[in-house]
Image: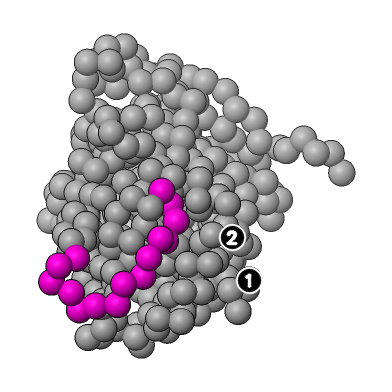
Amino acid sequence: MSAIEPITGRYVTVEVEGAPRRIYFEEAGAGRPVLCLHTAGADTRQWRHLMNDAEVTKDHRLIAFDMPWHGKSLPPEGFETEEYLLTTEAYVATVLAVVEALGLDRPILAGCSMGGRIALQLAALRPEVFSGFIAIEASDFQPAWYDIDWFHRPDAHGGEMGAALVSANISPYAPKAERWNTLWMFMASGPGVFRGDLSFYTRDDSLIGRLGRIDTARAPVHILVGAYDLTCTPEDARRTAAAIPGATLAVMEELGHFPMSEHPEGFRPFFLDALTRMRVPAEALK
Amino acid sequence: MLPLLRRMQSRLDATPHLLRLGRLVSETVLLKVGEAEYYLVFEKGRLAEILPGPSRKTPWRFAIKTDAEALAEFWKPRPRPGFHDVFGLVTIGRATIEGDILALVKNLRFFKEFLALPREEAFA
């Protein structure tokens, strides 16, 4: 068996809010496209286990990209004097620009945490672009129980503090190596990036009023939530699923907020099940 | 609780990566378990003293207040959801954190791993 993994990485430049963004993306597999969105303060590496899973990639093309400021996607020109604060508008525009640039035909959108939040936003705002939504650790809204300004200050390491904070959301069932691989991404995130992501995640409640308009007959919505997630609790996910007519929900008893990264073996049956739920009636695609 | 805290003190001394993470930590932390108070005096990452309270003379930087039953679950290898993390205890209403929380957050990994020492196999 070759030690070389099937994942390949490339770059694409798209335009978001009138300026170019050089985006790093990875992909593996062939078949129905699944666009994967990472959490706040992290990057595409969170999806590496599923992208290396032959059972998943035998009939799905998984694509994940690093949001600008994250992973190997650079921030835009002028970032050095800009306060990074992610907005729903910029996030939606970035996802749509990537779908268009890669020529993806009605992909499934799979997002975790803030990626799950934006997946539900897109289910409400641009349903015609996608054929299904897997919203992981996703809910309508939760205000922060912490001060997001803790994570960008000159006298302490934002990445290390952020990692120590989010470790609260990792299940004790997670294998130790994957717990620390998951935390490493937070430790290595750029200054102020986690804070800027959290600004979107903890302050923008615009999804609440839009959930009722999501049409799951056109594109299914399946929500997955880990019992050890303190940030998006099963209660938050249940409330959100209940507000979307036709949405389905699975509670993952032994998982936390980063299931695909923290506990790949525990998560894969839930993700495989989610993919089977993304079958869309042919008439809905017309 | 005091014998257990003393075991945590000696486990900390035998955990080099925590001593390295805590090398700038010289703070007094109040741990309140039920009605019992313990002042944990950290000096450069070591737990220099454990002073049983109550005391009105001992200043502290931050306090963690919880109960013995919650801590017993917290210290299991695989606690129930919410009991698995000190902030989890706060969110489920089984602990409060008072005082200079930023001093905790700046050294969050150190304090979290110190508090979780009884979970380790080597602790028994």
Name the residue tied to disc 1. Answer: B122
- Image x and y of residue B120, in percent: 57, 70
For residue B14, which numbered disc appears in the image?
Answer: 2
- Which quadrant, please, contains the N terminus of chain A? top right
Identify the mark nearer the N-term, 2 or 1: 2
- Examine the rendered structure and indicate whether residue B35 appears above or below residue A214: below
**Which residue is found at the position 28% from the left and 59% from the top?**
B28
Relative placement, left or right, of A17 versus B57 is right
Does the rendering let one see residue B31? yes
Tag nearer the camera, 2 or 1: 2
Which is more toward the observer, A253 or A25? A253
Question: Could you tell me which secondary element the residue under label 1 belongs to?
Answer: helix
Callout 2, which amino acid? Ala
Does the rendering let one see residue A219? no
Q: Residues within 10 Å of mark 2 (few under 14, many from 20)?
A: few
Callout 1, which amino acid? Ala
Subunit under mark 2: B
Q: Which residues are magenta?
A: B44-58
Which is more toward the observer, A222 or A179? A179
**Which residue is found at the position 67% from the left and 46% from the top?**
A52
Relative placement, left or right, of A254 versus A31 is left
**Which residue is found at the position 28% from the left and 63% from the top?**
B29
Question: Could you tell me which secondary element the residue under label 2 belongs to?
Answer: loop
Q: Quadrant of residue A122?
A: top left
User: Residue B45 in magenta?
Assistant: yes
User: Residue A196 in magenta?
Assistant: no
- Image x and y of residue B87, in percent: 31, 65
The Cα atoms of the two marked residues, 2 and 1, are separated by 10 Å
Relative placement, left or right, of B61 versus B48 is left
Q: Are marks 2 and 1 in contact (CB under 8 Å)?
A: yes
Subunit under mark 1: B
Asked if both marks, 2 and 1, belong to the same chain, the answer given is: yes
